């Protein structure tokens, strides 16, 4: 029996619209977002004057929304902003007839303003070896900073590793992890667009691994779907804003930034720290009662991500020729590690609220 889709709206916002996102795939689960109608452009715009008027009308409001959201992370405003960004980002990836419809230009201009505000508010990181720089020293410092990040000691991962999770908390974890996992291979492909030709080999190898090395049944989204064998496949997922934030952050790092140093740093930091995370998650899923046959995704990644992490950092060492490039890799790396830690924050906080 199918579960009815709940008819809810965002708190304190009566002008909302329910978006049900479906994918054409056997391993796809619909995602549901409730979004303010004022930020949904559901009709084509074919007139440039109308485009400019809409941009001028909307820019002050999106600036205020983004500023308030960035000043109060995890707030209701921040959560709403992540949903808007995610919806626009997804539309941008899937858009058709872009030469005949200007609404995507409107969304891009407004999104660029959000990204500008977000990036200006990020902390700036320094490189300790700046005054005695070599690519080797810089790469080692980057690796050390990745391994000392809070994600490696996150309480959610420690709880999983030590005790496992109750069934409802486990569903929250798997559902929100799915939101990012189903599109991760696209971020690797997107990063190739700004990466120099000579440095695309590891990206190609990683992308090939993500898609099962030519075997669709071994593609990572298909392997992850096995997690639902015991839990049951949900009829839909209402993702936490923190899960959407991770997707938004990865799209910025690998595609929107247009900076391969930033993107390489981001994915390199994630891959280097992943085996530790995967080991704790695998232990926790076993203790939570998932069958061994459900867990192939996690077992594979403990080994494969150790290989990927080393390869990505080797690529970074080849990319880094000066201090500024190393700092850009560092900024991207810590940006994406923090975004991933934010996913864990959201899951952990929701678990503790229901205990």
Image (spheres, rainbow, N blue to C red):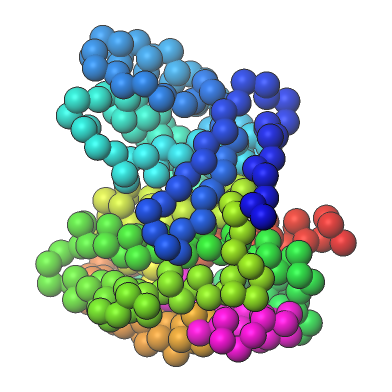
Looking at this view, is 161 or 26 the one in front?
Answer: 26
Q: Residue 244: within the magenta?
A: no
- Image vertical order of residue 58 relative to residue 218, above or below: above
Across and down, in percent, residue 311 comes to 31, 83
Across and down, in percent, residue 305 comes to 42, 82
- Image vertical order of residue 309 relative to residue 109, above or below: below
Say if residue 180 shows up in the picture.
Answer: yes
Residue 11 figure quarter: top right
Across and down, in percent, residue 235 comes to 60, 54
The residue positioned farthest toward the front in the image shown: 1
Residue 206 figure quarter: bottom left
Q: Residue 291: within the magenta?
A: yes
Instruction: Quadrant for the C terminus, please.
Output: bottom right
Looking at this view, is 227 or 340 the one in front?
Answer: 227
- Residue depicted at 62% across the width and 20% down the height: 15
- Residue depicted at 32% across the width and 75% down the height: 216
Please give the range of residues in magenta.
270-296
- Residue depicted at 42% across the width and 56% down the height: 250
- Residue depicted at 52% across the width and 41% down the height: 20
Looking at this view, is 352 or 239 the one in front?
Answer: 239
Across and down, in percent, residue 174 comes to 61, 67
- Image vertical order of residue 108 relative to residue 320, above or below: above
Judge from the rendering whether residue 147 lies leftward or rightward of residue 3; answer left or right: left
Q: Main secondary structure of the magenta part?
A: helix
Instruction: Quadrant for the N terminus, please.
Output: bottom right
Looking at this view, is 222 or 61 the one in front?
Answer: 222
Judge from the rendering whether residue 111 lies leftward or rightward of residue 338; answer left or right: left
């Amino acid at each position: 029996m199918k579960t009815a889709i709940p008819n809810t709206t965002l708190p304190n916002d009566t002008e909302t619209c329910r978006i049900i996102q479906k994918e054409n795939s056997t391993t796809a689960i619909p995602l549901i977002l409730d979004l303010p109608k004022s930020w949904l452009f559901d009709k084509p715009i074919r007139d440039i004057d109308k485009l400019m008027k809409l941009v001028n009308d909307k820019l002050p409001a999106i600036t205020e929304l983004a500023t308030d959201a960035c000043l109060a992370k995890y707030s209701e405003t921040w959560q709403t902003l992540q949903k808007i960004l995610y919806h626009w980002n997804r539309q941008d990836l899937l858009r058709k007839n872009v030469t005949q419809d200007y609404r995507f230009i409107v969304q891009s201009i407004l999104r660029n303003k959000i990204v500008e505000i977000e990036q200006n508010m990020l902390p700036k990181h320094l490189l300790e070896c700046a005054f005695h720089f070599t690519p080797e020293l810089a790469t080692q410092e980057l690796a050390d900073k990745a391994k000392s990040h809070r994600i490696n000691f996150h309480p959610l991962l420690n709880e999983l590793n030590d005790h496992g999770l109750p069934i409802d908390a486990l569903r929250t974890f798997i559902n929100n992890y799915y939101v990012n996992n189903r599109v991760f291979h696209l971020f690797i492909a997107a990063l190739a667009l700004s990466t120099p030709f000579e440095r695309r080999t590891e990206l190609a190898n990683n992308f090939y691994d993500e898609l099962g090395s030519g075997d669709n049944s071994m593609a990572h989204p298909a392997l992850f779907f096995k997690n639902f064998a015991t839990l049951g496949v949900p009829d839909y997922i209402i993702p936490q804003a923190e899960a959407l934030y991770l997707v938004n952050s990865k799209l910025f790092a690998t595609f929107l930034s247009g900076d391969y140093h930033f993107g390489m740093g981001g994915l390199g930091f994630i891959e280097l720290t992943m085996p530790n995370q995967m080991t704790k998650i695998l232990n926790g899923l076993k203790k939570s009662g998932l069958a061994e046959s459900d867990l192939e995704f996690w077992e594979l990644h403990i080994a494969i991500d150790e290989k990927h992490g080393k390869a990505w950092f080797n690529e970074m060492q080849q990319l880094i020729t000066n201090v500024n490039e190393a700092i850009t890799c560092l900024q991207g790396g810590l940006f994406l590690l923090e975004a991933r830690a934010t996913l864990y924050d959201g899951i952990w906080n929701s678990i503790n609220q229901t205990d």
